[in-house]
Structure formats: structure tokens, C-alpha cells
Amino acid sequence: MDSTSIMSKSVYISRVCGSSVLGPTGDRLGKVKDVLGTPRLRKSPRIIGMVLEIVGKRYIFVSINRVTAIDNGYVATRGVINIQRFRRRSGEICLSQDIVGKKVSIGNNTTARAEDIEILADPAGEWYVGKIFVRTSGNRLFSRGNTCFMHWQDISGLDQVPDYISNPEIKAADLAADIVDMPSTDAARIVEDLPDERLADVLEEMEEPEQAKIIDALDDNRTADILEEMQPDDAVDLIGYMSNKRKEGLLQLMEPEEARKLRLLLGFAHNTAGGMMTSDFVIVSPDTTVAEALALIRRQEIAPALASTVCVALPPYDPPTGRFIGVVHFQALLRQPPYQKLSHIIDTSIEPVLPTIDAEKVSRILATYNLLSLPVIDDRKRLLGIITIDDVLDYVLPKNWRKNEIDSTNNKENMVHNEKE
């Protein structure tokens, strides 16, 4: 049976789970343990693959794109199978484990139990959950109740399955990767429903072309709100690809203080210290106490890399500040009493850099001195921003590193379990 023939058939997971899995040459690889799906907005879950049990009770993942046939008691696959241990990501649904046997509500709050799940493919070859076979509770002892087939959307109680869109445990990078891989209509619905702050985090984890596709579909008012939620350096990278007319229009719509930060960064080339730095970090006076500094970096919106260092300068305290004095490291704060003033524990050994030096030199400085961050000053010794190690990683890694595209032949042990063909 070829892949075309199974696309027109529906299969129930009770017949899939436990089936032998055969490789391209007919060798038995293991057996199907579960079918893996991911939620979709206002639709039944999309099927992304199967969890296989191989020798030694080891579980691995096989993409649905590698399945060529599902027939009586076996599942046929093609290509190289990654034997990396399967690790379930937050939000993914193991249909047999999570749904089958689950109590749900149908009709007029009738209690039922999901007993089987249909999976099928659309004409484009995308697999998804079809109908669910449910059994109502019997009215009498030993009565098995009635059975029926229901659509996912018509059943209450399935929403208790973790929603990877609203689940705070889902990392923004994982959600960004899923949105990029989704059909454009599904991606558009998710973008529409995501809060601005969450969407800002997701956009920061995308490459510029993917960011542009999403931003181009949004109106200017929402785009301006999202830019305000993004880290200034990431926001500048995003609007740097826009036309001057739209860029200026968005800056006009933003809060003046947020727009001022972006205008400062827009004055520097992308591959320089000024282009890499962020202007949103902790700046205090020498008279600030340890307790006050710790309270500032304890704020939830401060990224871990930025919270590792407190910059000390003379007023004003918004970039460009008064004269830069030095930094205080997080560990130094923990070693001092709460009432101690920062003027007594300032580290002046770290040499700040000018905004015009190239990114490669910045990378070498951070690597040579094992630094997590590096201050950036102008020729008047005023503090302009700070470069963190994650900014440097974005520069030194290949442009498409987020896609995690690894050659399946030479690097099959390192393939991610949800690779796309």
C-alpha cells in the first residue's frame, strides 16, 4: 500500500497502537505505543507522528511524514529513523494516554467516556483527529451504556488537555517554531488570539522573514503595541526591515519613552556594538543600596542575562546617562548586607566599548574575559546600553540556526523529533 492509498482512509488508534512498525526494507523496528498530536485553534488536533517502543523499552518518535502505510497490524515507514529518545514537549497530546478512557460531557451534559479516536488525512496529506467514539454511562448496574461518534468540537472536557497556546510552560521558542511550521491560516488564528506580550516573546524567537510575514498582516496600532513589549534591540531589528514611512508611523504611535529607546538604537549599524546592545537594563546611582538593587533585578520583566549585572552611573539614568562609573555583579550583591551602598562594591575593571566597534570584536571580548554582559558608552563616557551574551550568540550562530535543519544522513542522531520533510 502506498502513501496515497492511506490518505483516503480513516484509521482508529486502537488498531494503530500495538501495531508492528516496519522499516523501508521490511525489518521490524518496534511497535506503536501512541499517536502524537498538537492542538489547533477551533479545530481538532493535528497529528504530527507516532511514539514507537523499540528494543529495551526505549521510546522514539517517528514523524507522520515518514509513514507510508497503515494496514492490518503494521505501520510501514520510509527513510532514516531517528533513534534519539522521545521527550514529550509541553502541549503535545498523546492521544491514547491522554484521551482514551477520559470522562467527557456530550449533548445535554451527558457523561460519557472516550473509547477510541479516528485519525485521517485531508487531500493535502495533513493528518488530524476525526471523530471520537464515546460511550455514555449506563443507567443500571452492569449496563454498558449507549455509544456514538462525536466530533472533537462537540465534546466538553477535552479542553483539559494542555493548550500549548496559553500554557505558560511552553517556551516562546517552541511556540515560534510551531507557528512557522503551521499552515498560514492556523498561524494567523494563533497570532490573532495571542496577547501582545506573548506574541512579542514569540516574535523575538523568529528569523526576520518570518517576523515580517506576521507583522505585515497586523494593523499599525497592534504592531506598535507589540514593539513596545519587545526588547528594544529585537524591536529595532524588526522595524529595520520596514519602509521608512511605516517605521516612522509606528514610532509615532508608540509611547514616547519606548520610541526614544528605539530611535537611539536605530542610529547604529546592525553589526556593531551599538546595533547589538539593548537600552532596557538596570541603571542606578552609586548611593543605591544592595536591597534596592536586588529589588530592581527581581522584577519579572528583567531577562536573566540583564539581571546578572547592575550598571552604576551619574544622572540622568535613562540612556544616554551621565558618566558611567562601573558595574555591580549579582553575586556581589548576594554577599553584601542589604544596607551596603553600591559605591563600595563597584567593579571598575570591565572596560566598556564604543558603539562603533564591530560585533566580532565584542564577541572576542566577552569570550576572552568570560563576561555575561558588556557596557557600551559614547565618547563622552555616557552609558548608552549593554550587550548580553545572548545578543552575541544571535550574531555568531548561522542565520537559520532557529530552524534546526540538520542533515538527516550525516547527523541523524541529532535530529529533532518533529522535523519537517
Image (spheres, grey):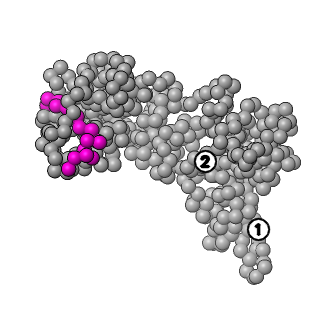
- Part of the protein shown in magenta: 320-337
Question: Which type of secondary structure does the marked residue at label 1 adopt?
Answer: strand
- Amino acid type, residue under disc 1 in the picture: Thr
Q: Residue at x 55, y 49 (%)?
A: 90
Confirm whether residue 306 shows in the render. yes
Q: Position of residue 141 (x, y in %)?
A: 76, 82
Q: Position of residue 44 (x, y in %)?
A: 64, 52
Give whichever of 337, 33 is nearer the camera. Answer: 337
- Asked whether 196 falls inside the magenta stretch, the response is no
| Residue highlighted by disc 2 | 88
Closest to the camera, between mark 2 and mark 1, is: 2
Is residue 117 toward the left or the right of residue 232 in the image?
right
Q: Position of residue 204 (x, y in %)?
A: 42, 36
Mark pair 2, 1: CA separation: 32 Å
Quarter where residue 155 is shown: bottom right
| Residue highlighted by disc 1 | 147
Is residue 322 toward the left or the right of residue 78 in the image?
left
Quadrant in which the C terminus is drawn: top right
Q: Position of residue 179 (x, y in %)?
A: 54, 39
Q: Residues within 10 Å of mark 1 (few under 14, many from 20)?
A: some
